[in-house]
Image (cartoon, grey):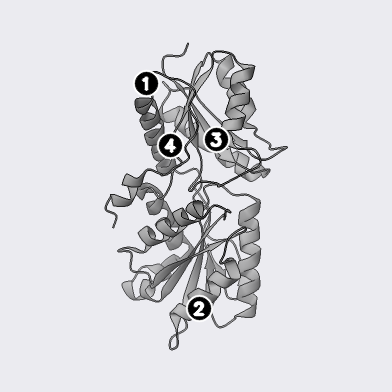
Amino acid sequence: MTTSPALLIAGHGTRDEGGADALRALVRLLAERHPEVPVAGGFFGAPASPLPLSDAVDGLVERGADRLAVIPLLTAPTGPVPEALPTVLARASERHPGLTHVCGAELGPHPKLLDVLERRLDQALGSGARKPADRARTTVLLVGHGATDPHANAEVARAARLLWEGRGFAGVETAFVSQAAPDVPAGLDRCRALAGAGEPGRIVVLPYFLLPGGPVERLHMQAEGWAAAHPGTEVFGATVIGPEPEVADVVMERYRAAVAGEPPFASAPCSCRAAAEDARQPHGAAWQGASLTAGAGDR
C-alpha cells in the first residue's frame, strides 16, 4: 500500500499526440512538486488514444497503489459520452481486485484557470492589450467543446461571466465547437454585432480547453474561415490553457478535497461537478484579419 492515495488524472477523448504530450508534462510537473503522491494520467472516451487511462491505472497499481483519487481533467462536465469515466474505473477495479477509488470534481472556472485565460488573451493581443482603452474595444469569444447536456454548456457560460468581470473587455461571448449552439461562426457574428458601429472592433477567440487536440484544430479552422469573410474585423487567436503551474495547483486542490471528503476510501461514482465555491472567490498568438497564425505558445 502506498502512503498517500495515488493521483489519477483523467483526460477526456483525445487521439492527439500533442494533447498526450501536454498531459505527460502536467504529470511530470505534479510529480516534481509532490513527490509524496504517486501520479499518472491518461485519457478515457477515445479509442486508440496514445495515452489510455487504463494503462495509467495499471502503472499505478504496479507501483503499489491500492487507492486512487481520480481528478477529471476537464473545464466543464462532458455530458453523456459513449465511454464514461465511471465505466472505465469499474473495469479497472475488476482487473485489480481490492483497488478502490474516489472521484473529485473537474477543474471548472477556478480563479487560477481564469488567470491563465487572461494571460492567454494578453499573449494573443501582444502590446495591444496594455491600455484600458485597448481592452474596452476587445470582445472575447470563449469557445467550449459543447455537449448535449445543457448543464455542461452552462459551465462555459459561467466561466465567460467570471472572465468578463473586472477585466475591462467589451464583453465575453460563448460558442461551442460541436453539439451546442452557437457555433464558432455564429459566436463571432455576435461579437461583431456587440462591437457596433464606429471604430473597428477586434475579437479574441479563446479556447476553453486545457489541452490541444482535434476540437481545437476545428475551432481554428472555423475562426479562420470567418475572418477571411470579414476582413474589416480584427480576429486574434489565443492558445489553450496548457500544462501550467496554475493547472497543477488546481488539480492538487481537487485531489486534497477528494481525499478529505471520502474517508475511508471506497469506490464512488464520479460526480464531475465543478465546485460552486469557485464562483464566489474574488478575481478581479495571433490571428490577424484574413491571414491567421498561431498565437503565443504555451510555456
Disc 1 residue type (three-letter): Pro
Q: In this view, does 39 lie to the left or right of 221?
A: left
Query: On the image, which quarter does residue 246 sit in?
Result: top left
Mark earlier in primary sequence (4, 1): 4
Q: Do the residues labelled 2 and 4 touch (CB within 8 Å)?
A: no
Q: Nearer the viewer, residue 82 or 135?
A: 82
**Badge number at residue 142:** none
Q: What element carries label 4?
A: helix
| Residue 290 visible from this viewpoint | no
Eye-nearest disc, 1 or 3: 1
Q: Which of marks 2 and 3 is nearer the N terminus?
A: 3
Q: Nearer the viewer, residue 172 or 105?
A: 105
Q: Mark 2 points at which residue?
A: 192
Q: Which amino acid does label 3 sit on?
A: Ala
SS at circle 3? strand
Residue sitting at 48 percent across and 27 percent down?
268
Taking 14 as reference, is 36 above or below it?
A: above
SS of the residue at dot 1?
Answer: loop
Count the marks: 4
Q: Which of marks 3 and 4 is nearer the N terminus?
A: 3
Q: How far apart are marks 1 and 3 (CA)?
A: 21 Å
Q: Are marks 3 and 4 in contact (CB under 8 Å)?
A: no
Q: Where is residue 287 in the image (x, y as percent from the top left)?
A: 57, 68
Residue at left 44%, top 61%? 121
Judge the density around disc 3: few (<14), some (14-19), many (≥20) Cα neighbours within 10 Å.
many
> Pointer 4 and pointer 1: residues touching (CB < 8 Å)?
no
Residue at the right extreme? 48
* Residue of label 3: 10
Where is residue 208? Give x, y as percent: 50, 55
The residue identified by callout 1 is 263
Say which residue label 4 marks.
251
